[in-house]
């Protein structure tokens, strides 16, 4: 770790906390050269997971890409501001990553990833689920999801 103030490479860890229900660490650090104090957040790196697109193209898993789709689903909810949408999207993204870690996989299709996302969204916020599903699924697939969730007449 490099000090953001002076660029020195050695720090003392003053405090550590487990965050995101055990999937990240928060650390308060102090630079041994300049005495500057700063915070780091350490997450599990999931770039070993390959995402297989419908076209067959293989991409490295991107947390930012997953987060952005979920964020838009929350942001499009009437009366939800960007801060609340970002916080909700962060929680859902972390839950999806826990599922991916639990599956012990190194590849996943975009369709399967979208199904996992939709399942978690349906439990967290049904409106966000509708927003997400109507964008990421073909109409006939989304209709089946709605029927399976028991919310469609």
Image (cartoon, rainbow, N blue to C red):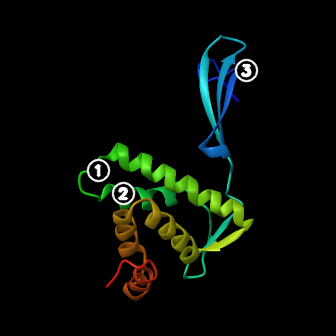
The residue at the point 45 percent across, 53 percent down is 89
Mark 2 or mark 1: name the one nearer the start of the chain: 2
Answer yes or no: is residue 42 visible: yes
Q: Residue 11 shows which numbered tag?
A: 3
Please name whichever residue, 142 or 46, is drawn nearer the observer in this view of the structure.
142
Q: Which type of secondary structure does the marked residue at label 1 adopt? A: loop
Q: Which type of secondary structure does the marked residue at label 2 adopt? A: helix
The answer to whether 128 is drawn above or below residue 13 in the figure is below
How many residues crowd mark 1 within 10 Å: few (<14), some (14–19), many (20+)?
A: few
How many residues crowd mark 2 within 10 Å: few (<14), some (14–19), many (20+)?
A: many
Q: Which residue is mark 1?
A: 80
The residue at the point 24 percent across, 56 percent down is 78
The residue at the point 68 percent across, 49 percent down is 44
On the image, which quarter does residue 129 sit in? bottom left
The answer to whether 145 is drawn above or below residue 6 in the figure is below
Q: CA distance from mark 1 to mark 3?
A: 40 Å
Circles 2 and 1 in contact, beta carbons < 8 Å: yes
Quadrant location of the C terminus in the rendered image: bottom left
Disc nearest the viewer among 2 and 3: 2
Answer yes or no: is residue 62 visible: no
Q: Which residue is mark 2?
A: 74
Q: Which type of secondary structure does the marked residue at label 3 adopt? A: strand
Question: Percent x, y for residue 37?
Answer: 61, 17
Q: CA distance from mark 2 to mark 1?
A: 7 Å
The answer to whether 129 is drawn above or below residue 24 in the figure is below
Please name whichever residue, 82 or 8, is drawn nearer the observer in this view of the structure.
82
Mark 2 or mark 3: name the one nearer the start of the chain: 3
Quadrant location of the N terminus in the rendered image: top right
Question: Percent x, y for residue 61?
Answer: 61, 62
In the image, 20: left or right of 13? left
């Amino acid at each position: 770790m490099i000090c953001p103030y002076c660029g020195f490479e050695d720090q003392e860890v003053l405090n550590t906390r487990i965050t995101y229900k055990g999937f990240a660490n928060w650390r308060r650090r102090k630079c041994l050269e300049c005495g500057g104090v700063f915070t780091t957040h350490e997450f599990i790196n999931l770039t070993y997971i390959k995402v297989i697109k419908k076209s067959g193209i293989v991409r490295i898993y991107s947390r930012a890409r997953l987060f952005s789709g979920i964020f838009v689903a929350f942001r499009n909810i009437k009366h939800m501001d960007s801060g609340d949408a970002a916080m909700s999207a962060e929680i859902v993204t972390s839950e999806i990553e826990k599922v991916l870690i639990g599956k012990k996989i190194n590849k996943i299709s975009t369709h399967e990833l979208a199904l996992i996302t939709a399942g978690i969204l349906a439990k967290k916020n049904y409106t966000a689920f509708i927003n997400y599903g109507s964008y990421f699924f073909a109409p006939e697939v989304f209709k089946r999801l709605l029927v399976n969730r028991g919310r469609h007449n």
